[in-house]
Image (cartoon, rainbow, N blue to C red):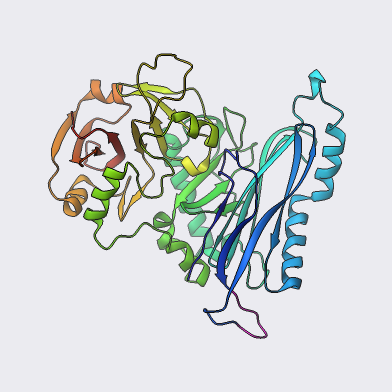
Amino acid sequence: MRCKRWVGAGLAFVMMLGAVSAQCAWATEAAPLPVEALGVVNMQAEEHTAGENNVIIPVLTGHPDEKLQQTINEQIAARLRKDELLRTLDKVKDWSGDEGAASGLHMASSATVIGSLLSMVVSIQGELYDGSVGQQYVTFNCDLLTGQEVTFADLFAQPEEAASRMETMVQEALDREGVNAYAEHAEAQPLPRESFAADARGLTLYYPGSQYKLINGNSGAFLYLYAQLEPLLIDTPITRALLALKPVAADSAKQLRQDIDAGELPGIPAKLGTPMAEYIDRYGLASDPDYTLDGPLYQFASPRMQGVRLSSAMYPKDPEDTSEAVINIRATLIDLYGILAGKSTLLDVADVLGPPDATTQVDADKAYDMLLEEGQSFWYNGQQNRLEFHGDANGLVTAVILHAGPQGD
């Protein structure tokens, strides 16, 4: 059995941690509970404010074992160095209006429960623990059945090998300027093994800003889909719960056709027709948009949107108006019921969906205009929208693009 609930909005953190409940199976060493015995766990926010500054301490409630709940909450407070944060908040509250004190202290958080795993990440922006000004992440993962912290080594069968392969994935993404093109500086090694958090889409590793920093000032992060990590994971109840989050369909072709008409892609928190402003507010922007023949192409700051870009109309009436609707969803990091960008080929796509409704050749000029590689695209039409699988010169799927409108080019 698995359970999951979201609080917050990933890297953008525009929603503060609030009360969210999730049903989970509980057990203790003394008297293990059967799967049928469910408890309700809540993550709530203990928030302290001073003007526009704030400190957020996530608090676990609703655990059937009050002593274990207290232990977990003490671990969270210790990890966040609660007392230090409150002292900083007390200091910055008198900075309001001071030109040299623009940093202040701003925190936001997200938390997820998957099976018995509690996974949380907190963003701290402004004056940091060491007195410097910037942004950093603090993560915490624990097994709600035991209160024990869950580490990188608890997830991977061969931690050293896993870290090496994951570092390679980061470096490859940086080299091709795909997932994290907007970096001020970035070093893939060493992998920040003990700074990670899980959510519905995958496992995110959070780097220190001294190693990996984006041009928007945030520390870098890298998202791995569960399908990418599956060969590396150890077999435990927690990892089985994580893998259960992979997009799965009894009939992949039928489900994909339904997704096309719904205007959504599995695991991607975006939908065609939604005002772009909603996603900008929710996830923040990594930089100014790029432009393709389809329109401005936005890349977002949140790891939840890593490997995803959204387009709106090419020529909005007001260039400053971000309320234009999303007209396509482009994903370079996606698991479409077993079709993985960067791993599957166009032939694999045809094996699942059948022959494409149309094909297009993408030469050097069009590749430049569309920010794609030279190659070929397979198109599949729905009743309302259409799905493009773009392959490079070797037929490797490098991007999946869901377009509004029923007809291909």
Q: Residue furthest top?
A: 318
Q: Residue at x 45, y 36 (%)?
A: 174
Q: In this rendering, is residue 6 above or below 382?
A: below
Q: Where's the C terminus, which quadrant?
A: top left
**Percent position (x, y) of residue 141?**
63, 59
Q: Which of the 4 image quarters holds residue 178?
A: top left
Expressed as whole percent of the image width and height from the top left, the position of residue 80 reads 74, 50
Looking at the image, residue 372 lies above or below residue 378: above
- Residue 254, placed above or below residue 134: below
Number of numbered callouts drawn: 0
- Residue 202 appears in the picture as rendered: yes
Q: Percent x, y for residue 405?
A: 24, 32
- Residue located 51% across and 42% down the image: 303
Q: Nearer the viewer, residue 293 or 367?
A: 293
Q: Is residue 355 left or right of residue 250?
A: left
Q: Main secondary structure of the magenta part?
A: loop
Name, please, the residue furthest toward the bottom.
Answer: 31
Q: Which residues are magenta?
A: 26-32
Q: Residue 184, image x and y in percent?
A: 56, 28
Residue in the picture at 41% in, 23% down: 290
Q: Quadrant of residue 325?
A: top left
251 sits to left or right of 195: left
**Residue 24 sits inside the magenta stretch:** no
Q: Is residue 150 above or below residue 135?
A: below
Left/right placement of residue 188 relative to residue 348 reads right
- Inspect this view and state whether residue 190 appears: no
